[in-house]
Image (cartoon, rainbow, N blue to C red):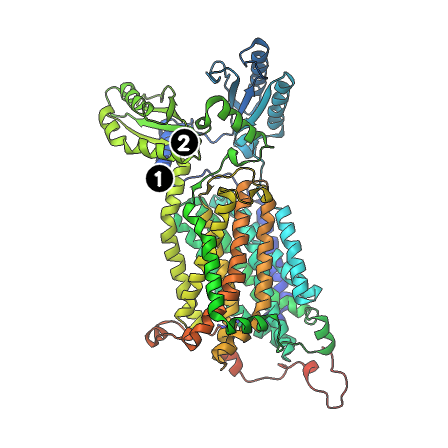
Amino acid sequence: MATFLYRVGRLAFRRRWYVALVWAAVLAAVGLGAVTAPSASDEQFSMPGIESQKAFDLMEERFPGASADGATARVVFVAPGGEKVTAADNRRAVEDAVADLADGPQVASAADPFGAQAVSEDGTTAYATVTYKVAANELTDDSTARLDRAIEDARAAGLTVEAGGDALEEAGGPGGVAEIIGISIAAVVLLVTFGSLAAAGLPLLTALIGVGVSMATILALSDALGLSTTTGTLAMMLGLAVGIDYALFVVSRYREERGRGHAPQEAAGLAAGTAGSAVVFAGLTVVIALAGLAVVGIPMLTKMGLAAAGAVVVGVLIALTLVPAFLGFWPNAVLARKARRSGRTDDGADNGGTRWARFVLRRPLPVLLLGVVGLGALALPVADLQLGMPGDEAKATSTTQRRAYDALADGFGPGFNGPLTVVVDARGDDDPKAATQTVADRIGGTEGVVSVSPARFNEAGDTAVFSVVPSTAPTDERTKDLVKTIRGERPGVESEAGATFEVTGSTALNIDISDKVQAALVPYLIVVVGLAILLLMVVFRSLLVPLKAAFGFLLSVLASLGAVVVVFQQGHGAGVLGVEQTGPIMSLMPIFLVGIVFGLAMDYEVFLVSRMREAYVHGERPGQAVTSGFRHSARVVVAAALIMIAVFAGFIGEKDSMIKMIGFGLAGAVLFDAFVVRMAIVPAVLALLGDKAWWLPKWLDRILPHVDVEGEALSRRPERDGDRDPAQEPDPAGLEPART
């Protein structure tokens, strides 16, 4: 491995123009494909294997065209204090607004609240549901302007008018501001770390090129592979973060090899052979974690994981080829100013990393206990974790969607915002209407049900749909219990009615998603952690080091998830982050956290411990090897972690509460993993284990493939002319060293 990558690095350095032109051609080709390819469609969310999805599929089959994915808007009208919407003036204002809404060219229907019985019992609140012929992202400016105008006209008549629904959702996701913040902080961190504008700018440049290639490829293939507009969000986030980190690691090793006296081309080859090997295996662990998202069984999540894995692969290839090529263009510019003047570096001198390593080596047990107990305490709130899919109730009160949600809850009850949909399959029954009525009566008599709507039959008359309004809010645990109760009583109800039924709707769907994600979490952990442990065994030729790495990862993930629960569910410190409404944690959050953070955690593990392993293989004692690893890698790992935290923390400023949650959780996980697990727990464990840390049973050593990650073959390679930098050779005449 090391020898092959060494040759790749030297070749890329020597043929730098060709390498740069190849990547420019690739970027141009995929960019042209992205521009000419059909635009990505909004993929309809599906979750195979759950009851809610089966009911949706049955509705699409029995009610063709009725479940089209057109956008909807629910406009809520509230009369002024002491008045009713049924009063003549207020009613006229509502009817005028509905008539204006129905007149749009993209509108399929606009239900009059007075004819559709959409008026609250006290007469103060009414709502009109507007259904469009096209999806939300296909609405024209004229359609959205007509909706806004109708709302403003009704407000001018004295009514309080708010609106919810996907027709009002802003297009696009996080992007722009978050990335700019992350890149800006990354630039500062790199500049402080390297002390050179060129060394700071090179990782940023190559990372942006890698993200450009990845995103253009996703856009070019979006229509052919059925990728949605949200597929690239995770790819952009991770591609930027790992692209900077991988380039950072190679550039840092290049500077180190130059400090040892190697010529620029040789230093580039050695950097690719040693640091590049670590990059390859670190990238493989991230790819395993992301591709493993397929285990969950959510098609959209699988596509997001594979797209992000592709972005990581591009980042690895960039680090191994384009980074050495750019080093060929600016071989001395990436060195610190002091090193450029003197031709030497202080690579062997003590630094903050060595001093911290010696501190931990002197007190391994207290450091280990403090780290484990601290993360364990942060993980305790996970026991109170409640999963769900926050909706409009989690939006800021400044949004019309949140105010519409509150108005409907006040006028019609908290359960009105999340009705259950019951699909009755009476095919083969002699009297489908009687069977449906039996099901409706039994469900309507269940404790916690406020009302049941009249059933609507399909053309064949063998399938019916009706709504059930709970007495509690969609995210309330009592609503979840109600769904389980209705489904639990199904055998008796179906036996009495002679027909089958299934419960669906957004509330039931969110409950089913939460249950499925929780059930998939353990298998996902087994698959991903198991494969990564095997991979790390190959890298480190050790049994205990990979197990220690996996244990540390679990600690950091649980601690970060506990922090998410404390802020976003329990509300402690929520105001500081701009979280106005607490509630259940997004169902996919644990899977996202496990998948992404596991890959990144293994990055730090490989970067840091591979240098310890390298020193140990070359003859240093275990304690010395730990110190050597920290001398060379601690600063790089700290810089990489700060960059990751900056990229993820930039998303905390987004308005969407789910994006806030993801950014906060990922930033916290990187903070805990890099600074507590890798910087404290790892050296403490290695200090306590000593030589046993690198023990591997002989039978296992024979089975596992041997890969030279430490560059041992490179150290045995005979030195050739041109390997040494003339600037580093002593000058017998005492003159200033020659410059290259």
Q: Residue at x 52, y 58 (%)?
A: 672
Crowd rating for badge 2 (residues with CA inside 10 Å; few <14, some 14–19, many 20+):
some
Residue 598: in sight, yes or no? no
Q: Is residue 708 above or below residue 566?
A: below
Q: Which mark is residue 50?
A: 1
Numbered circle sitting on residue 505:
2
Q: Residue at horizontal 76%, vertical 90%?
A: 733
Task: Please state the horizontal and vertical placement of residue 630, each as a whole percent of the image.
Answer: 55, 71
Number of marks in picture: 2
Query: Seen from this angle, which residue lies furthest front?
Result: 366
Q: Camera-side residue: 8 or 640?
A: 640
Horizontal side, residue 596 vs residue 489: left or right: right
**Residue 140 to residue 282: above or below:** above
Kind of residue indicated by mark 2: Gly
Residue 418 position, x and y percent, is: 44, 30
Residue 144 visible in image? yes
Residue 636 picture quarter: bottom right
| Residue 320 point in image, percent of width and height | 56, 66
The image quadrant where one finds the C terminus is: bottom right
State the SS at label 1. Answer: loop
Q: Residue pushed farthest bottom? A: 732
How many angstroms separate mark 2 from mark 1 (CA)? Answer: 12 Å
- 52 on left or right of 247: left
Crowd tier of the residue under label 1, counting other residues whose Cα lies within 10 Å: few below 14, some 14–19, many 20 or above: some
Q: Is residue 203 above or below residue 493?
A: below
> In the picture, residue 288 is in which quadrant?
bottom left
- State which tag comes first along the sequence, 2 or 1: 1
Q: Amino acid at mark 1?
A: Ile
Q: In the image, is 516 to the left or to the right of 632? A: left
